[in-house]
Image (cartoon, rainbow, N blue to C red):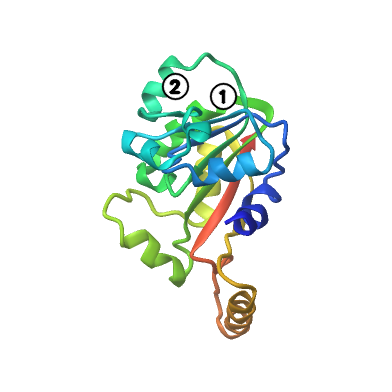
Amino acid sequence: HIREFTRNIWGPAGFQKDHRVLEIGCGVGLFLAYLQSMGLEDITGVEMDPKTKDYMPESLAKHVHTTTMESFLETHDGALFDRIVMLDVFEHFTFFEGIDVLKTLSKLLNPDGRIILRTPNCASPWGLQFQFNDLTHKAMYAPGNIGHLSLAAGLKSYGCLPYTRGSRLRGMTTRAIEWTLDHLLTDPPPIWTPNFITIIGKS
């Protein structure tokens, strides 16, 4: 997980150890624990399910608010964040709800802050299982339309990047297959990985 998060999120999104980070929908705190391992101290998590704290050490659980995103934002003290992260969460909102979420979160960003989203990649055939195996997913995202959504929220997409998993050998095999398909197909997807990262900031 450390290698995966470092390769796919920490580096591309320009995290630094003095950053103030908010994660919406943090689950059992895997990414927050990663941030702690990287030396970050000013971290905040929001998770609806209070039982998730049973699976966290106290040193991590004290940073997590077990409430809804809306309730957290209503009671938040207004302090700004350098990075706001939503991993496998954003697709649970409709397109119009997603616009409102981005507008709201942008108010919590420092001027050079970034919102980082990980969503299923519906432009890739590999991503369809991640999208359609969950009945609670309300919106389908690909590198093109998530850029449009960012603009609709008055923000800017600074890039959509592949989210790679697995061993180095499997990664090499996968890239070889994708390279071949890129040269065989008329209209290959811009990103092949089942999930992708979007980095969003203020225009």
Q: Is residue 27 left or right of residue 106?
A: left
Report the residue that reaches farthest toward the front: 58
Occupied quadrant, residue 168: bottom right
Asked if one can make out residue 124 in the rendered structure from this viewpoint, the answer is yes
Pick the front one: 105 or 170: 170
Residue 76 in the image: x percent, y percent? 48, 17
Residue 190 in the image: x percent, y percent? 58, 66
Secondary structure beneath label 2: helix
| Neighbourhood count class around disc 2 (C-alpha, 10 Å): few under 14, some 14–19, many 20 upward | some
Residue 83 in the image: x percent, y percent? 62, 35
- Check the picture and name the quadrant holding the C terminus: top right
Secondary structure beneath label 1: loop
Tell me the residue at 39%/66% (across/down): 128
Q: Earlier in the sequence, mark 2 or mark 1?
A: 2
Is the Cβ of the residue at disc 2 closer than 8 Å to that at disc 1? yes
User: Which residue in the protein does label 2 denote?
Assistant: 73
Tell me the residue at 43%/15% (across/down): 75
Image vertical order of residue 7 relative to residue 203, above or below: below
Q: CA distance from mark 2 to mark 1?
A: 9 Å
Residue 14 in the image: x percent, y percent? 72, 43
Amino acid bearing label 1: Leu
Image vertical order of residue 160 relative to residue 66, above or below: below
User: Which residue in the protein does label 1 denote?
Assistant: 108
Q: How many marks?
A: 2
Tell me the residue at 62%/77% (across/down): 175
Pick the front one: 191 or 167: 167
Occupied quadrant, residue 143: bottom right
